[in-house]
Image (tube, coloured by chain):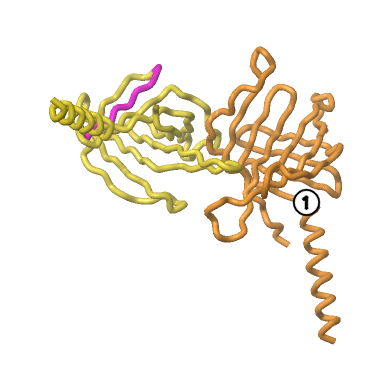
Amino acid sequence: MYRLYFFTIVLLSITSINAMAQADNYVSTGYCRFRQGVWEKEWVQSSDASFIINHDSGEIRFDHTTWASHSLKIDRSENSQTEEGVPLIIYYCTEPANGDKWELRFNEWTVFDEAIYYYYYQIEIKNPYSLMRFMTKKAD
Amino acid sequence: MKKTYFIIALLICLSGISVTAQVSRFTTSAFSRTSPDMNDNWKPWSDWLPMTDGQFLIDRDNMRASLDSDSWGTHINMQIDSTAESMAAQGITLFTFYCSSLDAGYDRKQYNIEILAYKKPDVSEVQYQYTIYLTDLYSSTKFLARYEEPSE
């Protein structure tokens, strides 16, 4: 009987670990746009956008409170770095619904204030219609 | 002769430090905001966002301070009415500047500028980082900033 409990607990643990490892959720804290050939320097606070990056299924989901949602298939990813030398992952994607090509650039943005580190993740999206950056943090 | 050179060099160094300490320039890298709620309690600070074009100037010689940011369309000129210096915590120095607006139409609006100077824990070299608070009656914005060494 104890052995059965043990195996049940082990199985539950493994499945929950897998469930956690499958997808990373990010919610936006702000955005900035690329307009007339330059990045706007002003970042606007906004929690309207969210991203789910699922490495296991190779999919990225982009949701926004007022825009259409998009499900993207990751075609390939590439490791690079930002101008400041921060590691950067570039996801090259296709939106199966319409064949649009998307590019997502993902890098960590760390802030140290007095005694605490704050971890954010910048996600830059480029699709046939827009180019913009979201600052995000991991969803609880 | 060597002693004379030493004294001259020392005097140059000291005067340089004194001059550079009078006008301090800071460039921002990030900001966070708060404001009072309905019960006049300050809300939690917002998440940090990048802000790379903010320029703070503290001119102790002329008792002037300013904040300029083209992206925000912010240009605040202030008179420093009084100053204070204290320790906010171990290893964190706090400089406070009590200011009033010099800009037309602001009717001597009061601002507090508080500058915290501290070292990042995992950086081996002696490198200070600054958190600058700009507070008025209705809002407070804090900026992460780096000190701009004077060119000459």
Up/down of A74 relative to B4, above or below: above
Quadrant including the N terminus of chain B: bottom right
In-front residue for pair B150/A18: A18
| x and y, in percent, of residue B102 in the image | 82, 33
Check if residue B120 falls in the magenta segment: no
- Which colour denotes chain B? orange
Is A25 left, or right, of A76 in this rendering? right
Residue displayed at 18% across by 30% down = A6
Residue displayed at 47% across by 31% down = A31
Is B127 left, or right, of A63 in this rendering? right
Up/down of B116 relative to B103, above or below: below
Quadrant including the C terminus of chain B: bottom right
In the rendered image, the residue lying farthest to the bottom is: B1
Badge 1, how many Cα within 10 Å: few under 14, some, many 20+? some
Up/down of A102 relative to A89, above or below: above
Q: Amino acid at mark 1?
A: Val
Is A85 left, or right, of A98 in this rendering? right
Q: Chain of mark 1?
A: B
In the rendered image, the residue lying farthest to the front is: A1
Residue holding disc 1: B23
Residue numbers of the magenta segment: A58-66
Predominant secondary structure in magenta? strand
- Which colour denotes chain A? yellow
